[in-house]
Amino acid sequence: MKKLFLMFLALIFIGLLAAKVDLNTAPLSELEQLPITEAQARDIYEYRTFVKIFDNIYDLREIPSIDQRTMNKLKPLVVVSIYTETDDVALRREEISYLIERLDSNEGASEGMADVWEDYLMTPQNVNRMQFNDFVSLPNVSAVDAAAILKRVARGDTIADTRDLRGTLGLSYYGYSNLRNYVYFKEPPVKNRLMFDARVQYYTRYFEEGQYDMLHEPFLPSDYGNNWLTVPQDKRSSYWGYFELDQVQPDISAKLRMRYGNNFKMGIMNHSPKAHEGWQYMNSEDFLNSSKYFAGYENTKMPLLGNTALKMYLGHYRATYGEGLTMENTDFYSSRKTGFGFSKRIMGITPDLSKAQQYALRGAAIELANPYFNASFFVSDDDKDGLAYINEDGSYVMRDEYGNDVFTDNAGNQYIMDGGVALYTYEDGSAVRADKNKFFSFVTPSLPYDNDTMLEAEAHLNASLYPDEIPSGSTYTPYHMQYINLAPRRDAIREKLWGTHVEVSPLIGTRLGFTTYTALYEDAHFVVPGFNELKDIMLRDSYNIPKIEKAMNAEISNLYSTQTDSYSRDYRRVIGFDGGTVLGNTAIQGEYAEMSKDGEDFKLGDDPKAYLISAHTQSENLYFITLLRNYDIGFDNPYSNSFSEHERFDDTILEKNVYALSNPLISDLYQNSNQSQPEKGIYFETRYKFNNYFTVGRSYLDLWERLADGRRSARFQSELEFRPLYQLGMRFRYKNQVNRYDDTAERGVSKTNEYTMAIRTFLSNRDFLELEYRYNTVLSPPYTSLTNPAQPGNNSMAAAQTLMTGDYIGVNYTHNFTPSVKLQGSLVYWYGHGISHWDWEDMEIDFMGERGAKAWIAISSRISNNMYMNIKFRNKTYQDKEVRIRQNNDPNHPNLVDQLSYAERVEHSENTIRFSLDYRF
């Protein structure tokens, strides 16, 4: 009887409970039956849908329209059930949320690779069917790890789970811990279904320091030989003033990616860079023309072909092979890119929605791969930006097939000049005809304006090179170059490119590959003058000619030309061979590339070349990298992105003497360079964990020679971490760099030392606090202009080495309010004394000079099940250098009377906002 009574009470309770409305599952129509208004019911429904699931009934008070009286009324009528996520995509995203967040934070540095890695996180690959390139393309997975897994699978030993994976002989713990989230074993965690990822980002980005200085360079009349001239102070005499670039204009991007499992993929991205007019002034055609897009199909289970994978892409894609010498298309440069650890390359064909524009490939690509053979074929047809030779009116300088500049008279007839005589016909009697425009090189412009807008700016700046009026009886002596003769032009070069990569793998971990591409230019001739002729082309004032006579500028004169005294062609061709093998716990790999120039296409060694060989040895607590490279000066491959210490044109006139150029925008060749500088050297890198207390962090030594002038340099960095407790870490880092270590009396020598100490605390709930102090010293060479004697007069006595010092202190903090809300912030103060400091922010590096302070704060929040928000605010306040001009060390020299000879420090304040919103479903 007692049991029946208890069952009766239970049935009554269940009936009462069933009669209540479940706030987490009730449809809108059921919520509207409650004793509340229709608007309140909709607010409850939208809160549950777009904000979060109710944890308890008191969450109702977070809705503005629900007051305490309403909640009391609803208490006996509603219930909050325990909610369990049943959607497999949402479950997977929740499981790997911290990894996705880490990839998102590296978006600026990884050039769009985060998209590919995020896809693999959401829809992992079957570890038992993956191939060598699939493994080594994942972050922190080495060739040794890949070979260990493949050898096990080849023996017929199927990997069943993560514990089984960890037991693989030869697989390091570091490789296992990074791999496990990208693979599955039996059933995929997410079934095939349609998934979307939409992102919008708004960023009030400032120009980098080099671009800032370049755009401020003025166009002023020549005062040399014009004693009557007073140089005007006109803000609009520079690109910065003409375009009013002191007004902060945001960088805006929008990206949409769609895919069905890992098979069907498509996406579109539009990026409106800083200083661009923005989307509001675009029509639909302009929007599509400036966007990147792709559609692709991938299949890792090709029928009847065993373990064979197929990739096909239309639109924009990336192609990467070997060590990046022959083909790795990107606009961005990264120093010391070893291809290991976090500086990875994703091998083969992948979709491209990165912000790279200039060296993006647009066309079609196909890749077929199995464990023994890999073949890729790709074609591209796209318009590229170029540094064009222009006439005074801004029109292109034309070129004929024989290598002559072609001019047009007032009647529209074309002619060439021969010994000061205009010739309208060639020796065979045919009329002179220009077939292509004349270009200096490819260039990635800093300014986003179209060609018509730039023509108007150039006309204004050309006029600024002449005085408004010339006094009666006086004459004006102009510059050596009297107008802008080299200028960037957008979408001016039609490039048709095709290429292929073939690779064989006779043994597990061993592969031999061949890569080649040919780029055809139907409307452009690249013409680079010889070393001695550069001064007549690039300099505005003949007074500065000695500045270009340095050996360093051999980098510029050795750029690729399609027309020279020995040949005339309309293409660029590069071939390369790559390979690698795994011997025990050591992986050896390398690549040799050669660009066809004066030699024969199918003969190696007679053209500019580049090669790189590296070895990577690993064990549980140690890795060691050795890397040898050599890049010829004439190896000008715009699709190369390999290891080096510096980008191309570093320390040339394009960086150091921008003021001397006929057009400051020529410096964009350096400012936005994506290639490695011609150099040869050897690089060592290691990390070793002694025990749980002491670890030698990433440490490296690089010894290299800059081939343009033979300067030899050395760079060393090492760090030691001591963790007496798991939650506490102390890190000590030392960095030393010596330029021109083989000649201590040379003016180009410098010795830099950097000492860093950091204390880190790892708090509960993944919170983090760090205090860092850095002290820098720079020893400059014996240099007469630095002696600064008390008495005025010519300097003839070399000084001893001059010591400059600077220090930096910073605090970094991370606090996780909840699993869905995180705050990061930093406060930095530095005093440079002429030394440049650097700081790594949440997803970008910032360089800072002289003296200042910087603070930033970023909030990341998962504001609903599918929506993610990140907002960052930064203030950077700093001072310029104090400058005093002297002549013969005399600040009161008669030639300085009525001249601006002193510039005091000016304080600048920059406020930036970055806001991004992601919607994933």
Image: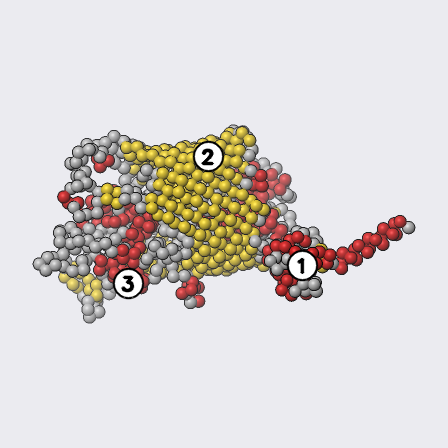
**Relative to 601, does residue 705 appear above or below in the rendering?**
above
Q: Quadrant of residue 701?
A: top left
Instruction: Report the residue at 61% width, 37% height from top.
Output: 167
Instruction: Report the residue at 70% width, 63% height from top.
Output: 35
Secondary element at image label 2: strand
Instruction: Report the residue at 52% width, 53% height from top.
Output: 869
Q: Quadrant of residue 526?
A: bottom left
Alpha carbon distance from label 2 to label 3 = 52 Å
Res 194 seen here: yes
Picture disc at residue 70: 1
Mark 3 Cα-neighbour bin, 10 Å: few <14, some 14–19, many ≥20: few
Are discs 1 and 3 less than 8 Å apart at CB?
Answer: no
Which one is nearer the viewer's eye here, 916 or 825? 825
Earlier sequence position, callout 2 versus callout 1: 1
Alpha carbon distance from label 1 to label 3 = 66 Å
Q: Position of residue 715 (x, y in %)?
A: 37, 35
Amino acid at dot 2: Ala
Amino acid at dot 1: Thr
Which one is nearer the viewer's eye here, 108 or 139? 108
Question: Is 850 placed left or right of 464 in the picture?
Answer: right
Which one is nearer the viewer's eye here, 366 or 119? 119
Q: Residue furthest front?
A: 69
> What color scheme is it?
secondary structure
Alpha carbon distance from label 2 to label 1 = 53 Å
Amino acid at dot 3: Glu
**Relative to 634, does residue 312 appear above or below in the rendering?**
below
Picture disc at residue 758: 2
Q: Position of residue 678 (x, y in %)?
A: 33, 43
Picture disc at residue 456: 3
Earlier sequence position, callout 2 versus callout 3: 3
Earlier sequence position, callout 1 versus callout 3: 1
